[in-house]
Image (cartoon, grey):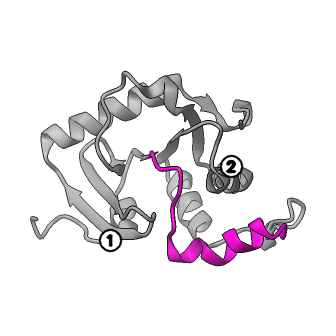
Amino acid sequence: MPSNVPQTFLDLLGNCMQSAVHLEMRDVYAVDYERGPFADWRAGRRHYDLADRASWWRPWLDVVAEATNRGVTMRRARIVSEPVSEYTRYLYDNTFTNVAAGEQVRWLPRRQASDIPLPGNDFWLFDGQLVQWNHFAGDGSSQGPEVTKDLAAVALCADAFGAVWERASPHGQYEIH
């Protein structure tokens, strides 16, 4: 990989000037930083009091707000199986925080994505020029990112995200099943 390609997600987003789009296609993620909050959610404890922004505003939301405040359009699309997994319900219940920070989020039932050519991994696409693949193991644990400027990969991701975004329902309009 060329040395001029930023190596961390924060570097990638920090260098982003126009758009950062994220496609999620898994029904379960088992990333370390969500273990406690997901367990609490499963036990019926909600971390976020809508009236108390300080109770749910977290470092990720600062990153989103900083990017959107400097003019970067951030969009996230989630392809989900229906009925949704317990984890997807957890994501759905907490997505209001992403939206409040300035991120646009849409949901697409997997059955409606059958004819869309999709890459094999979740990804971020920055300014339509650089892809960060997010690799996961079968249990949903992160296997680390990979960054590429490969033109074919960039085109695949741009086309896939565009097709999903066009069909998907905005967060406030998607009814979870």
Q: Do the CB atoms of the residues marked 1 and 2 lie less than 8 Å apart?
A: no
Rendered-image quadrant of the N terminus: bottom left
Classify mark 1: residues with Cα within 10 Å, few (<14), some (14-19) or many (20+): few
Residue located beneath label 1 in the image: 8
Instruction: Give the residue type that dot 1 points to.
Output: Thr
Q: Residue at x 59, y 42 (%)?
A: 105
Q: Dot 1: what SS?
A: loop
Q: Residue furthest right?
A: 51
- Magenta span of residues: 24-45
**Which is more N-terminal, label 2 or label 1?**
1
Of the two numbered discs 1 and 2 in the rendering, the one whose residue sits closer to the viewer: 2
| Residue in view at x 86 percent, y 59 percent | 50
Q: x%, y% of residue 157?
A: 30, 39
Where does the image place residue 134, in percent across and percent down from the top left?
A: 35, 59
Q: Nearer the viewer, residue 107 or 3?
A: 107
7 displayed left or right of 45: left
Which amino acid does the dot numbered 2 rest on? Answer: Tyr
The mark found on residue 65 in the picture is none
Quadrant in which the C terminus is drawn: top right
Q: Which residue is mark 2?
A: 92
Q: Position of residue 129 (x, y in %)?
A: 24, 45
The residue lying at 55 percent from left, 39 percent from top is 81
Q: Residue 86 vs residue 3: left or right?
A: right
CA separation, marks 1 and 2?
Answer: 27 Å
Q: Is residue 5 left or right of residue 8?
A: left
Splitting the image into 4 quarters, where does residue 14 fall?
bottom left
Give the vertical position of 101 relative to 63 (above or below).
above
